[in-house]
Amino acid sequence: MIDVPIEYFIGISFALFSIGIVGVVATRNFLLMILSVEIALVAATLLATVFFYATAEGDLMTLLFAIWSVAATEAIALIAFYRYLGRYETSLDVSRLSKLRE
């Protein structure tokens, strides 16, 4: 089995998180923003999994089940929000979502 240092995973997580944050800041398209948030969450999940595996003696499946539960809940909420936007024929451009402020 190949023993990969934790520093590599920290670097990959930092790079993915940075890509996600830049994606949220750089675009005005709602779907691209959600994709960027997902990339940042994958980075956080990778980092949490690596640290849990390296430091804890517990069951890794417990952590992964919690992460998957949060991801499934987020996906359901995003689908509901997307259907809500589609019902009113609203653009997915974030700068045009002024109706949500009122």
Image: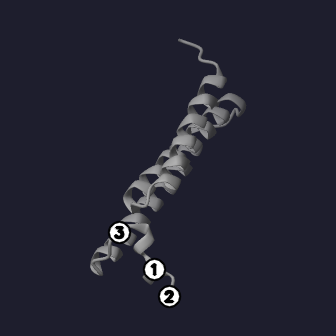
Q: Residues within 10 Å of mark 1 (few under 14, many from 20)?
A: few
Q: Looking at this rendering, what residue extends furthest in the right direction?
A: 55
Regarding mark 2 in the picture, which secondary structure is present there? loop
Identity of the amino acid at label 1? Ser
Identity of the amino acid at label 3? Tyr
The residue shown at (43%, 68%) is 94
Q: How many marks?
A: 3
Identity of the amino acid at label 2? Glu
Above or below — where is 1 with respect to 97? above
The residue shown at (53%, 54%) is 25
Report whether 28 appears left or right of 84: right
Instruction: From the top left corner, tell me how far across and down residue 88 is, in percent.
Output: 30, 81
Gap between marks 3 and 1 measured at Cα: 16 Å
Above or below — where is 65 with respect to 10? below
Regarding mark 3 in the picture, which secondary structure is present there? helix
Residue 61 in view: no
Regarding mark 1 in the picture, which secondary structure is present there? helix
Report whether 83 appears left or right of 48: left
What residue did someone put label 1 on?
98
In front of the other: 89 or 84: 89
What residue did someone put label 2 on?
102
Q: Nearer the viewer, mark 3 or mark 1?
A: 1
What residue did someone put label 3 on?
82
Gap between marks 1 and 2 measured at Cα: 7 Å
